[in-house]
Amino acid sequence: MYVAVKGGERAILNSHALLEETRRGDTAHPELTLAQIREQLGLAVDRVMTEGSLYDPDLAALALKQACGDVIEAVFLLRAYRTTLPRFGLSEPVDTGRMAIRRRISATFKDLPGGQVLGPTFDYTHRLIDFGLAGTADRADAPTAPTPVDDSMPRVTDILDSQSLIESERPEPDERDVPDITRDPLRFPAPRGARLQNLARGDEGFLLSLGYSTQRGYGRNHPFVGEVRLGEVAVEFVPEELGFPIEIGEITVTECQMVNHFKGSKTQPPQFTRGYGLTFGHCERKAMSMALVDRALRGRELGEAPEAPVQDEEFVLYHCDNIQATGFVEHLKLPHYVDFQSELAMVRALREAVAKATSAPSAQETADHA
Amino acid sequence: MSSEVLLKVSGLEHRYGKHVGCTDVSFDLYPGEVLGIVGESGAGKSTLLKCLATQIEPTAGTVEYRGRDGVMRDIFALSEAERRLLLRTDWGLVHQNPRDGLRMGVSAGGNVGECLMAVGERHYGQIREQAGHWLQQVEIDLDRIDHMPETFSGGMQQRVQIARNLVTRPRLMFMDEPTGGLDVSVQARLLDLLRRLVGELGLSAIVVTHDLGVVRLLAHRLMVMQAGRVVEHGLTDQVLDDPQHPYSQLLVSSILRV
Amino acid sequence: MHEPGYNFAYLDEQTKRMIRRGLLKAVAIPGHQVPFGSREMPLPYGWGTGGIQITAAILGRSDVLKVIDQGADDTTNAVSIRRFFARTAGVRTTERTREATVIQTRHRIPETPLTEGQTLVFQVPIPEPLRWMEASERETRAMHALQEYGVMRVSLYEDVARHGRIAKTYDYPVTVNERYIMSPSPIPKFDNPKLDRNPALQLFGAGRERRLYAVPPYTRVKSLDFEDHPFHVETWDQPCALCGSTTSFLDEIITDDAGTRMMVCSDTDHCTQRRAEAEDAEPMRRVAS
């Protein structure tokens, strides 16, 4: 005799317990500390902060620990937490021109004021596995330079702008309000601020592939890396009671300014165009990809006919959020047996109708007999 | 032909920045009349047609249309909803490329039937019957009613597009190079079809084309355009046989028969 | 008592107000999709965040909540959502349709007829009924505004031309209040008639897609069809193997390797009630005979 299966609640609780055990792993090994994750898996922490759109390295480290290293799961934890936080207001725009530079490179000029500062990068390493890292031997610190990094590090785009060689980046007069895509639904056509917010939170892999596609002919925009810079910037806020800005802290950001194909017309002399990328921490790949996609999406205002997926605003912005994406993809695991039952009934009925029609002497147009 | 004007165009102009698409265009169209608009590429014919069919908005001038209730209305003073309704019922628009005027993922019958369903038809059998009737009117075999447009030749796709437009019995058709891109023999057949339909149904039409042979066969009157302006306007035979304006003369004398 | 550190039902009061304003607009325009600022929730998008936000926005301390998925109270996601509200709102929960004031559901409408004062909250994955025919949101919004529903009707025509009947079985499109075409969420078409002139308030939430819509009580809801191919619901050739019902939606259970099937009510509460009533009737019959 069939008895309806019960015990869903107990199964869930047991599953949570098993997950907890799996997360901890073999207790013969010491438990990870947040400091270890924050210090030694910094790039994962940076990615979680960027896509979680919350600057808190310790919290991001905790999320990674709780998520067993699953970056998207960690981002989800941060986003859900972020929703509950009170908002004080908007900061002043961050001035990356006053950044305490740790890395700054430009592909558009061989040399420029402040020079090319390589900083900590994988760029010129040889990807040979370092088996020495299997142990925990101490390593010597990197040597300190005799003189500090130059104070004057003008942005390449500012240099080009001062000669009117690149389009100006000034907000439209009616663009006073900064949109907040976590509060208001996205509408199309989307203003640039909303697009950039989306991209900043967007999945690195998705944006990387889209950016790559522009380099292979799917919406080409002739990019040059005007500048990539990494370092600390001050965050300033104007409390109502004071009426002037105070510095409330410092964050690490990576900024990428792409210099793209020039645009001009009979009435307007040509200028280079821009693409912009900004991330928390050191997420260079993401910042560059974001800049490529930003420029592609600006095709509309620059009069470019949308031909490639990366130029389709709705396609890019709807699908770059990996929390939405994973939610919907993974929801397929939920029971769908009622709808499946309806489909089964229809398929059986249609097959019956076809069988009847092909066995009948005159094959007429099938009629609805249900 | 009725003596009441169907479409009245006054001083119509469209500019993009400094560039003039078309300017100072005025004419009257009567029921049952076919007006041809000719000129070389870039003369402004397509721009003019797009303005008339409300695909783009003119920068100056008016377009007035007499509805089935007999009232003359300024088309661009109507709401977008009213304009789109007009396009679905009173007017037809035949694109140069049939892919622009058809749903490629829908059967021929579905394409023709959609316009009936869009105006409230709810009986499948009747929708199918009417779709079949109009497909036959454009000389497409009834056994192709469930086939996808992809499986049709260019000429057949064009005929499905025409059927799709005719099913709501429009009073005014806009056609942009209706025979463009088709084989000469296919063109001839299509033109004969159009001429028959226009005559039988008492349609008015505005046909844009660079092919003088098309206007000779279809149009009662002709407008010649050059650099965005109408340089000559008159009865088709008169303009073709005795062109007055130098540009018209050039056009007529350099007819290339393929 | 609900979990400390969180507001009642998790969402802050401002967010609840924002959602309720959206719901009021939705109720004022039956079947019209209202965009809203959907929040990131502790449950994944696609797993009911829209329904959860609506429930959180309308729930009061004296409400009684029922949560079902595929018609059953103890499917894993229904359990998970019910636990979420137990933790964050501390409201009474129930499995009895008759006792609930708010019912959150995924993919089914309860068999037990609802009454005035009850609210049914649907979880919706894709709120746009025209999405499969037109991918662009801008275009579909214009189509709804201008009542240009030709694409939808064409898809039904194509079904009949190809299969001899309309082949949609779930998420079957409806016209609400003779104006908007709406997606009723992926309920089987069997449940569509229950939407029509229901005394309960029916609210629909799509969290990931950020849309709310509603069908106020006693509103006309009609499933799309052709005059000569009228809408009809599924039927089975066997009753429920447990309670004998011939009028409820049945699930197919495979009971052995040979594929032997058994049909059982999808609505577990309905089935349980029927079996309880049958048992109550038993002693009476024994006395009578």
Image (tube, rainbow, N blue to C red):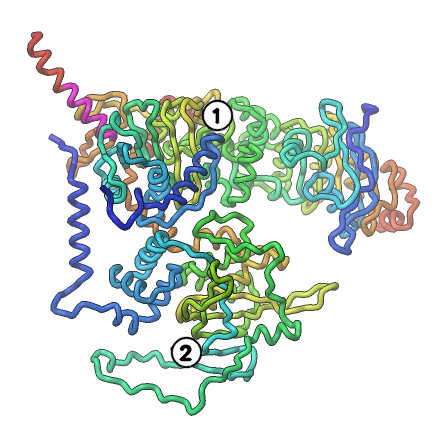
In this rendering, the count of numbered labels is 2
Depth order, front residue of B137/A133: A133
Depth order, front residue of A275/C29: C29
Q: Is residue C267 magenta?
A: yes
Q: Quadrant of residue C66?
A: top left
Name the residue: 43% across, 22% down.
C230
Q: Tag 1, which chain?
A: C
Looking at the rendering, the stretch of residues picked out in magenta corresponds to C265-278
Q: x, y percentage for residue C4? A: 25, 48
To which residue does mark 2 refer?
Answer: A123
Please state if A203 lies on the left or on the right of B256 as rendered.
left
Helix, strand, or loop for circle 2?
Answer: loop
Q: Amino acid at mark 1?
A: Asn
Q: x, y percentage for residue A274? A: 57, 66
* Within-10-Å neighbours for mark 2: few <14, some 14–19, many 20+: few
Q: Is residue A276 visible?
A: yes
Helix, strand, or loop for circle 1?
Answer: loop
Residue A184, placed above or below residue A127: above
Residue A278, placed above or below residue C32: below
Q: Tag 2, which chain?
A: A
Residue B222, placed above or below residue C190: below
To which residue does mark 1 refer?
Answer: C177
